[in-house]
Structure formats: structure tokens, C-alpha cells
Amino acid sequence: MKHFIITTITLLMIAGNIYGQHDSIKYDVNLKEIVVKSMLPRTKVKPNSIETRIVGSILEHAGSAEDVLAKIPGMIRQGNTLEVIGRGEPIYYINNRRVHDAEELKRINSEQIKSIDVINNPGSEYDSNVSAVVKIKTIRKQGEGISVDLKSQIRQTLITGKTDPGTSIDLNYRHKNWDVFGGTSLWTYHYTQENVIGGGTYTKALTHEQTGIVNNQQHSLGLQYKLGANWQVNENHSVGIMAQLYHHPYVKGVTLTNEEVKRNSEYEDHVIADDCFEVLRHRGISTNVYYSGMIGKWNIDWNCDLAKQTHHEKNNIYEQGHSHDNHLYTEGCRQNEVYATKFVLAHPLGKGLLKLGTEDFYVISKNKYSTHSNLLPNANSKVRELTLAAFAEYSLSVPMLGQLVAGLRYEHLSMNYDDLLDVTKNQQRKLDNLFPSITWNRAFGSWSLNLNYAVRTRRPTYWQMRNAMEYHSRYIYEAGNPQLRNTINQTLSLTGNYKWLVLGIDYLHAAHKIQEWAEPYNNEGTVVLRMQNLAKPVQSYSIYTIVHPTWGCWSPNYTIGITQQFLTLDLADDRESSGIRTTSFNHPMFLFYANNAFRIPSGQSQPWQLELNLQYRSRMNHDNGEMRRCIWSLDAAVQKSFLAGNLTFRLSANDLLRHMQEDAFVDYGNYLVYQFRDLKNQALEFSVHYRFNATKSKYRGAGAGQDAKSRIK
């Protein structure tokens, strides 16, 4: 670490001496956005987003789309998850087509990307359940005939010795105004995790504790197929259809548990458990049909989507204890169907642009669970949900005042919950909500300011609303909760931009937040985990600074920030005389991301790309838990392209510090849990990417019902 800091300081001094190019900024009234012209990568600050141009920048050679996303302003990586700062996980679009499979981000090469737009305040056009949107635009290349895009990679974990190969191929045939395209992907995945766990129920009458070790191992094989066609009738009209099918022919794993049990501080039992699970069926299909065109001054976009998913899993659980043994065979099956349509009209009105639209979707979600024992009841339920939405948005540029965008979205939800084993538990629910949003954007010389306010919601997933109670171990069960309410989020953000400097402040007020909770199930120390709505609202803020210049061959992207929640809970605790213990979970998190990319010239050929990326996250409170350990992560990569950039080799190393380990503590009142988790994420990955006569499909389908499709996972 000492050598890394010294090297970084030295490079800063050298880069400071060679950096002499000045930036400029101007406001384009016709484009209704602020264009920041700087040393690449270039950034456009829009009313509710930041757009980063990738082509021609150092990020053009950063690897996959996933690698690029972790390095652009406004986004950070949390473990294996990409997030928008202050907004959490976004939904993704590639050329206005919704991405349903996150693996697709790994299969798109950075050299195909034109720009990325990070929207941290989605307008009324998007589902109220969407907190952030990332739009990826690829490079448009002309030409006819067949194009091939082939990528293969292999990942070798250094601790467990597991090898995961993968490959994907995309074909496109273009003739005049027609595109016919297809592709397939194959990948394998090994997952290994070691945990030191502890849990206990603490009351005046009983103290029941379990401590031990849990090891998880999983191996899976995945396949995905894509087929579609697009017809660009003329400059004003295009139609298309696309279908994607994914399938996991092999998913198996095992969870091994070895724990000691104490009652009132006295030895009670020693439990050894072996949970072998297998996914018998996991497949899904999604289709999209679209029309995009212009009639007069009206822009028209229509999308119709169908998505289906089936998951069938079985578990064989063997538990051995001194008191008694258990053998359970559990089986779970869930099926989901989504039918959605979205219609958007846009027309100039006065000096602004008016956008009107509707979005409707119907969902059928079925969940069935059986234990083949008397320990837990069987469950069989069905949820039918119809959502009708209408929205309007108007954007206007006013001299001296800047640009204003105001939107309003109305949603009517009708849900029927049917318990197929007990009709007395059936219920109906109807909701009507309005979700306003407003954005102000203005330039002040070289500065630009964005102020955003929006009301959004966070709906429970259909899996969280199931009625099944599932067996995890002798002392832990997990259940769904059909009574869950929607979380209502109010967000306020202020973003300032000066050349390659971004400053941001975000505030969130969450009412009825959905959070996992634990409740006693019996007098033997067993608890049941289920999602509940918090009675008190949760408030949080984020303050961050992003620095992303380009100095010579060096392009740093540094993010420094702090985020903090304000949550105080009255926890049930029988050890207190009042039976209530008031506890605050307000410890802030500090983060520091230092992404460094170096582009080293190599004569007449493509330059070398070197990367060194450091991530740090401090201790913090999250919900009713505490992360007790600081996390460091150091990644490195080297990349070289040939054949005018059409053949690329990339070698990367992850978690070089071997410090991706988490130490968590969760407080449920009478029930406390702690877990030390070793992610075993240290690995090498080598990839080869080849493109022949690469062309960009003209497919313009944007998808519909994204909220419903995201909730069926």
C-alpha cells in the first residue's frame, strides 16, 4: 500500500506538469443540455443525468460494458453489484432496449460503446418503482452483409482453484433496410463462500445461542439465445421483433453447517447439517415487438412485451444432533408471467416539448412449496396484479432561468392474492397513486447546477409476498408476507459540475420501508425471517465528489463520499423492564474509489491499456445492521488490441489485497445475528474478443412493464 501511494503521488506530479490543455463549456439552446468539452472522456450534464462519451476516450479500451460502468462518473461498485451513487441498483437499456440479463453487460465490449447516460432522477416516463436508469448507446456502423462478434473468456479463482470458461457469439445480417440478428452465450459459474456465524434468542426466561461454521458451494451452467428482425420502412418508420431465451441446464450446490447450541449458557446440542440442492428447471423467455416512427410533428413509440419464467428447485436436508436427527425433502416451484404494453407520444409545444404516454401490465405469479414432513405446512398461492399507468412530462428552456422539466405519473394497481390451500386468506387490494417529478438545470459560466425532486415507490417482489414458510435450518425458517405495503420514497438531489469535477448531494425519505425482520417461532429458540414494513420513516443522505480528468496518458476517476442513514428503532427486548429497547443505527459510511487507467503508445499499433483500481469502504450501519469491517479491494488489468481494434486481448486480476471479507451484525431485539463472510473473490480472468465486419443493429425496441419484470426475480 505504501508503494502504491508513493507511485500515485509521483504520477500526479508528472501529470500536473504535462497537463496544459484548457476546457470550455457552452450552453446549447437547441439541444437543451449543457455540453462540457474537456479532455476525453467528455461529459454532457443534462437536467436529470450525466452522459459520458466513451468512444475516443481512455474508457474505450476498458474491457466489457460492466468494466466501463464501474469507472464512469456517478456509478460505484459495491461488492459484485454496480450502483448509482445515492440511488442503488439501476435498470439498464442498450439502444433503448431493456436489459433483462445482467450477464449481457459482460458480453458487450467497451469498443462498441458510444456513450453512457446515468439518470439518477428518472422522470414520469419510467415506472415509479425505478430509482435509477443507465442508458448505453453503441456505435452506429454502416454497411451490408454478415457481421460476427465473438468473445471468449476464462476465469480462474486463485483460492478455490475453480475454472469458469464462457463464450458468446452474435451474428447480424443486414440487407438494405432489413436486419436479421441472433446469438448465443454459454457460461459456467462456481460460487464458494465460508462463513463464521452466530445467532441467539435473548429473553429473561431463555437464552438460546448457536455458533458455528457454514460453507456454501455452487456450480451452475447457463445458456442464452437471441433471435430478432428489424425493418426500417423509411426514415420515419421502423418495426421489429426480438425474442430471448435463457436456460440453466445444470445448477447444483451444497451448504454444510457445523454449529454448537447452548441453552442458558449450558451445552445443549451439536448439530451437523448437509443441505444438497438442485435446480430441476430454470428457464425463461422474453419477447418484444415495437414500432417507432414520426407522423407530422408527433414522435410515436409503442412496445409490447411478454416475459415468462419458471424455477423448480429441490433440497435434501440431513441434520444430525445429539438430541435428535432430521431428514427433510423440500420442493419449491414458482412461475411468473408478465404481459405489458407502453405507448409514448412526443410533440413540440410552445418553446418546449410535451410527452404523453400510457403503460399497462398484467402479472400472474404462482408459488408452491412442500416439505414432505410435518415440521412446516405446505403452501400454494397465486398473485394476479393489474397496473394501469398514464404519464405526462413537459420540458421547457427559458433564457436566464435554464431548463425546467416537470412530470406527473398516475398509477392504478389492482391485486388479487389467492391462497389455493386456504380460501379464508384470500385478499384484494386496490391502490391509486400520483408520482410527481420536477427538474431544474442551469449553467453559470463554467459551472452547471441540477436540482431534482421526485416521488417514487419501491414495491415488494412477488417472491417476498409469497405465503410459504421455508426451512433453512433447525433454528431458522424463512417466510413471505402477503401483507407488505409499498415503500414511498421522496428524493431531493443537487448536482454541480465544473469541467471534470462533479459535486453531489442526495437526500432520501423512505416511508414504510421494506426490511427483513425476525420473530420467535417457538420456545425452542427457532425464529422465522420475513419482510416487514418499518413503522418509522428512514432518512438518509449522500455527499460525494467525483474527479475524472485526463492528463496525458493517465485518466484517473476518483470518487470520495459519505452516506448516512438516520434510523432509530424501538426493539422488543424482554431483558429490559419495559420490554422495549431503543437503538439507533446511524453510523455513516465513507467511501473512496481510485480508478486509474494508463494508455501507453506502442508505435504504429494500438496502444497498451493498463489499469489499477482501488476501492475502500468504511464501517457503517445499514438498515438494522452494522458492517464492522473496513473493506479494501485492489484490481489490475492489462489490455492490447490488434487488427485496427477488432481483436482484443485482456488480462485482469481481482482482489489483489485479498481483503474482500465482511463482518456483519444484525439486531432484531430479542434475536441477534453476526456473520463473518469470506467472499473468496481473488481471481484472474483472460478474455479474447474478435469482431468481423461489425455492424450495429437498428433495433429500437424499448420494452414495457419493466417494473413488473424486475419484481419476478
Image: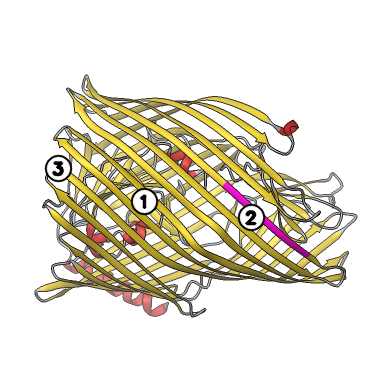
Q: Residue at x 20, y 28 (%)?
A: 294
Determine the CA span between mark 2 and mark 1.
26 Å
**Disc 1 target residue:** 74
- The stretch drawn in magenta includes residue 329: yes
Residue 485 appears anywhere in the view: yes
Q: Residue at x 51, y 55 (%)?
A: 282
The chosen color scheme is: secondary structure
Please give left or right for residue 97 compared with residue 284 in the image. Answer: left
Task: Report the disc number at residue 625.
Answer: 2
**For discs 2 and 3, the disc positioned in front in the rendered view:** 3
Which residue is disc 3 drawn over? 177
Q: Main secondary structure of the magenta part?
A: strand
- Kind of residue at disc 2: Gly
Task: Report which quarter residue 7 is drawn in.
Answer: bottom left
Q: Is residue 96 magenta?
A: no
- For mark 1, does the 10 Å Cα neighbourhood hold few (<14), some (14 to 19), or many (20 or more) residues? many
The residue nearer to you, when weighing 667 against 284, is: 284
User: Where residue 553 appears, x then y in whole percent?
Assistant: 20, 68
